Amino acid sequence: MSKKVLVIDDSPFVYKAVTKALTDSEYEVVGNALNGSMGLEKYSQLKPDVVTLDVTMPIMDGLETASNLFKMNPDVRIVMLSAMGDETLLNQAKEIGVKHFLTKPFKPDALKEKLAVALQ
Ligand SMILES: [Mg+2]
């Protein structure tokens, strides 16, 4: 059975890139949310196996989203997709408990590898 992926990112381009990268793989992108608030809703609706999470988003950013996701499910699997230069934010994310990070733009294989590690 394929693993369900939820993409939380305000850039539709990233949603498209993730979807394309995971075509014909063991992963299926089941949803997209353009900010953290929408992301939390979709997380409870869709119950994905793993979430890709942007850092910089309107309404609710990736850090706040991550801490809320950990409250909803302490075992939530998150791969944070960050842009170059977000180091301070990434350190904050690590403090919140995010363990898996990938820099945008990413290669399809790198994304699949990160998802696999996050799901272990
Ligand atoms: Mg963004």
Image: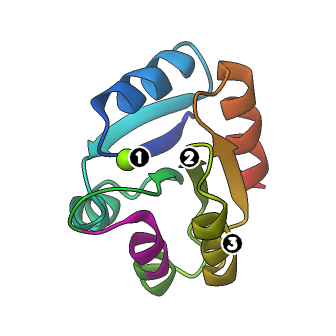
Amino acid on which the number 1 mark rests in the picture? Leu
What secondary structure is the magenta-colored segment mainly?
helix
Element type at marker 3?
helix
Q: Position of residue 44 (x, y in %)?
A: 31, 66
Q: Which of marks 2 and 1 is nearer the N terminus?
A: 1
* Range of residues picked out in magenta: 60-67
Q: For the C terminus, which image quadrant? A: bottom right
Q: What residue type is labelled 2?
A: Leu
Frontmost of labels 3 and 1 is 3
> For mark 1, does the 10 Å Cα neighbourhood hold few (<14), some (14 to 19), or many (20 or more) residues?
many
Given the current orientation, which residue lies at the most extreme front position? 85
Residue to which mark 3 is pinned: 91
In the rendered image of this protein, does residue 97 appear above or below residue 9? below
Which residue carries the number 1 mark? Answer: 6
Give the spatial CA distance, label 2 vs label 1. Answer: 12 Å
Q: Which of marks 2 and 3 is nearer the N terminus?
A: 2
Question: How far, Cα to Cα, is label 2 from label 3?
Answer: 13 Å
Residue carrying label 2: 81
Give the residue drawn at x 68%, y 52%.
Answer: 101
Q: Is mark 3 within 8 Å of ligand 1?
A: no
- Please tell me how crowded label 3 is: few (under 14), some (14-19), or many (20+) other residues with Cα within 10 Å: few
